[in-house]
Image: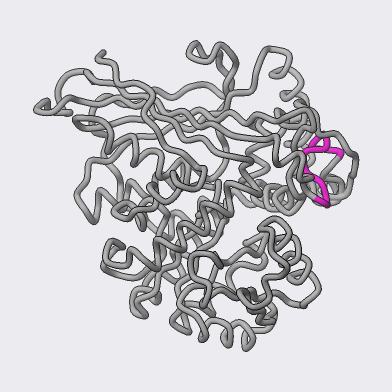
Amino acid sequence: MAREHPAATKAAPQSREKPQAVLERAAERLGKAALGAEVGVLLCDVGDAASLAAVARQTRLVLNCVGPYRFFGEPVVEACVENGASCIDICGEPQFLEGMYLKYNEKAAEKGVYVIGSCGFDSIPADMGVLYTRDKLKGTLTAVESFLKVKSGPEGSCAHDGTWKSAVYGLADQDNRRKLRKKIGYAPVPVVGAKLKSRGLVFYNQQFKEYSIRFMGSDGSVVKRSQCYLHTELQETPVQYGAYVNIGGLGSVIKLMFAGILFLLLVKFSFGRKLLAKVSVQNTKELSVRIFFFPLVYCCLFVFSPVLIQYPEFFSAGFFTKKGPTQKQMDGTSFTMTFFGEGYSEGQDPQYGKPNVKICTEVKGPEPGYVATPIAMVQAAVSLLEDAACLPKRGGVYSPGAAFSKTKLIDRLNKRGVEFSVISKPEL
């Protein structure tokens, strides 16, 4: 961000020690002696409303990196909305994202500010990937399925246990999320064209020659919110969406099934949540990556709950650790998200007949959590600042696709290593 807007870049932590360490690491990576002159530091605390308000009054845009967001995110959103600053985050917690919409959408609109959630790996590749696929199809796109594959190098990969905590608490609170959605009362989105077939929790994927599972993170809900907005406000054809993850062979499925069932059982009870949040072992091999993606485990990882908080490394087979990934692990990890879309050629009415065109697109990038996420967040911030004329005319609480569909965000991401491309466009 300092390179894009050096005069406006400030960090706002609770104490100076951690940001100073971050600035030193960043300076080293950039080959500079120091970044002190380019990045100012303002101290604030999510438990101190006055300090948050003071920071919000000094800027146009806050990048909200607290977490878990269900515990620490709202004070930042409230301070920004009340004090006229826009705010973006990297949250993958659907209940928080939708809760902020319910509480602050109208107020943000009145203030003319934008609160945009999920601007990291959750869920810019998925949300913007669907829009990219739509724009590249010559005709009307009506349905898309995405398949995520994360590859790690010889050092393996892992993530910070803050994500694990968010997942654990989210899963335990699913009932409240359903109640929240009833309060919001989303406008129904019509199914246009052939209905997208629902797949099972686990299935063999012929395209990739391996097993796939449902992606139980925030992507589905974020894309649905974007499509709802684009249809309701801009009268665009809504796109049906299904999100999946490729996990490997049958052996991986069996291992993940046992791990997922254990996780699901523990997450339902308070003592189990505490147990799961405490365990600590180091194992960053491919198994840990796959456990991260098993549907039941992943559901708990991104739909969060209060049961697995004390032993994250043990119950995630080492994927979630207190320290997060090493530099070697990050350098060796990458992701690919492949989109298979179908629709109707130009001049054909989607209400009649079967889809007659297909398209395959791809979003690929570096390590998702610590490399691709900051790229996505910073470029979303730059788009918000520089593409103001292309944003929704009204302020409010938005998903990435709703906010950035008319901006140059995809072009910016392409230039910085999160690449969108067309693989093929065969006729059916």
| Snapshot quadrant of residue 246 | top right
Query: Foreground: 296 or 114?
Result: 114
Residue 267 at x, y = what percent? Answer: 75, 43
The residue depicted at 32 percent of the width and 51 percent of the height is 405
Considering the whole magenta stretch, tell me its main secondary structure.
loop
The residue depicted at 77 percent of the width and 26 percent of the height is 287
| Snapshot quadrant of residue 245 | top right
The residue depicted at 74 percent of the width and 77 percent of the height is 14
Q: Is residue 193 above or below residue 125?
A: above
Q: Is residue 143 visible?
A: yes
The residue depicted at 39 percent of the width and 29 percent of the height is 361
Q: Is residue 262 above or below residue 24?
A: above
Q: Is residue 46 visible?
A: no
Magenta segment, which residues?
314-323
Residue 142 at x, y = what percent? Answer: 27, 31
Residue 6 at x, y = what percent? Answer: 53, 72
Query: Foreground: 49 or 152?
Result: 152
Q: Is residue 214 above or below residue 118?
A: above
Residue 30 at x, y = what percent? Answer: 66, 58
Please state the total of marks drawn on the protein image: 0
If the image is split into quadrants, where does the N terminus sit?
A: bottom right
If the image is split into quadrants, where does the C terminus sit?
A: top left
Q: Is residue 358 above or below residue 275?
A: above
Apparent side of residue 195 relative to residue 307 in the rendered image (left or right): left
Query: Foreground: 412 or 344?
Result: 412
Is 287 one of the magenta-colored residues? no
| Outermost residue to the left | 347
